[in-house]
Image (cartoon, rainbow, N blue to C red):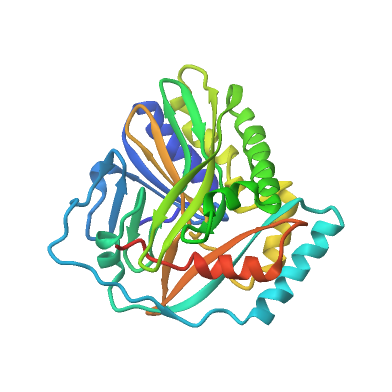
Amino acid sequence: MKTLQAKETKKYMNMLGTSGEAFLAVISFDMQHNHVMPLETICDNDCLYHFPNKANAHNSYPRKINTQLNFTPLPFDEYHKAYKKVLAHINRGDSYLCNLCFETAVNLNEKLHHIFHGSKAKYKLWMKDKFVCFSPESFINTHQNTIYTYPMKGTIDANKKDAKNTLLTDPKETAEHYTITDLLRNDLSMVADNVEVNRYRYVEKITTSRNQLLQTSTEIKGMLTEGWQNHIGDIVFKLLPAGSITGAPKQKTMDIINKTENHKRGYYTGITCLFDGTDIDSFVMIRMITEQNRKHYYKSGGGITSLSNSENEYKEMIQKIYVPIH
């Protein structure tokens, strides 16, 4: 499977978009380790994908998956050191919102492609010897020259008392979601006209192998010019990396992330884009288990603002280590 850098990826996506040929693009966080695959060339022994309206994997699997995800969380002291660095930048005005992520070593009783088949998520992707991803977060999609994006920020245990109201009224979660909505609205304005917020902070429930979570998202839309498919690669790359997993302002916050996080994100928090010949559907690659030298790692994190509490952020990072099998 050929790896492409950013310039090659954009050019190839533009070419396929112009010809109306359906393809799958997998783009890493740094946008330099990418794969663009015409759908007819994808071998399901190497790559499995599942979108709401398109998949190369069967809906059913011959046996029940009972994934056991065993791990020892990152020590709080180590997390807190990184958190303090991020908070210092925020207090200096370098960033208003910074998404801080870590990787956690996990022990699995199932192979990654088994987890792909057994997990339940809006979007799923498995790449042989690389990772499995089961993401709840859309990136962009299009319909009849309208482009949509769906920033997701805010998570709470659904079993907590009055969980929905607590999530929607929490000052930190409210400020974080507002900031990321404003960032994504501005990002979309770089590629579309008449950009507006269509639905603000709606709540969705996610069921995991451990518990249920509530998460908040917003829908933003804009109008693309006729023939935008000819420039599909340029459009996607103008919006990368996704604002919901970086922060604001984006470039300065990315510098903070690169200096603070103790791992390379790789494909984690990159995006996967499916073009069906007419329209795009795509997702942010969160909720991911990676494979490195036969060892497995789960990457997770959350947004830090001036209103954050390090213990709560640490708990949220751990809460997001799950497989949606139920």
Residue farthest to the front? 161
Please state if 255 lies on the left or on the right of 211 as rendered.
right
Residue drawn at 38 percent across, 29 percent down: 279
- Coordinates of residue 200 in the picture (x, y in percent): 57, 35
Residue drawn at 57 percent across, 65 percent down: 316
Residue farthest to the right? 92
- Coordinates of residue 6 in the picture (x, y in percent): 54, 47
Q: Is residue 264 above or below residue 140?
A: below
Residue drawn at 63 percent across, 35 percent down: 187
Please state if 118 lies on the left or on the right of 285 as rendered.
left
Q: How many labels, in total? A: 0
Between residue 296 and residue 220, name the one nearer to us. 220
Task: Decide if residue 135 is in sight here.
Answer: no
Task: Decide if residue 147 is in sight here.
Answer: yes
Residue drawn at 39 percent across, 59 percent down: 133
- Coordinates of residue 141 in the picture (x, y in percent): 44, 34
Between residue 215 and residue 226, name the one nearer to us. 215
Q: Quadrant of the C terminus?
A: bottom left
Q: Is residue 222 above or below residue 153?
A: above
Q: Quadrant of the N terminus?
A: bottom left
- Coordinates of residue 158 in the picture (x, y in percent): 47, 57
Between residue 185 and residue 293, name the one nearer to us. 185
Residue farthest to the left? 62
